[in-house]
Amino acid sequence: MKAPSNFALDRDMRVVEAVGRVGGTTIFAARSSSRVIRVRDGQTTVIPVDMAAIERGDLRSNVWLMPGDVIFVPPTM
């Protein structure tokens, strides 16, 4: 992320919009290996997100966010 931060979800938002809200990803981001980490009732769920596919128009992994979700975009190796 260009400017990692946190913010309250004040309305319905999908992953790509949240990433855009913090300035997008850097050139070093492994966008195809992104994920949303969600904890509900003590259970952690990791949801794969392919930011590169979303940018190409494949919106299947552009999930709706829930309060407390963490978006993780790892660096390329």
Image: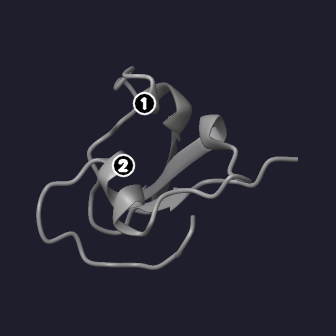
User: How many numbered circles are shown?
Assistant: 2
Lower sequence index among marks 1 and 2: 2
Q: For the residue labelled by badge 1, is the local secondary structure a helix, a strand or a loop? A: helix
**Is residue 30 shown above or below 40?**
above
The answer to whether residue 65 is left or right of residue 25 is: left
The answer to whether residue 77 is left or right of residue 24 is: right
**Is residue 66 shown above or below 68?**
above
Q: Which mark is residue 54?
A: 1
Q: Quadrant of the N terminus?
A: bottom right
Q: Position of residue 56 (x, y in %)?
A: 45, 23
Residue 34 seen: yes
Q: For the residue labelled by badge 2, is the local secondary structure a helix, a strand or a loop? A: helix
Residue named by callout 2: 15
User: Callout 2, which amino acid?
Assistant: Val
Cα distance in 3D space between marks 1 and 2: 10 Å
Residue furthest to the front: 27
**Is residue 7 shown above or below 34?**
below
Residue furthest to the left: 11
The answer to whether residue 65 is left or right of residue 54 is: left
Marks 1/2 in contact by CB < 8 Å: the verdict is: yes
User: Callout 1, which amino acid?
Assistant: Ile
Residue 60 occupies quadrant: top left
Q: Position of residue 21 (x, y in %)?
A: 34, 65
Q: Position of residue 29 (x, y in %)?
A: 68, 51
The answer to whether residue 14 is left or right of residue 73 is: left
Residue at 13% x, 71% y is 10
Residue at 25% x, 77% y is 8
Q: Nearer the viewer, residue 27 or 51?
A: 27
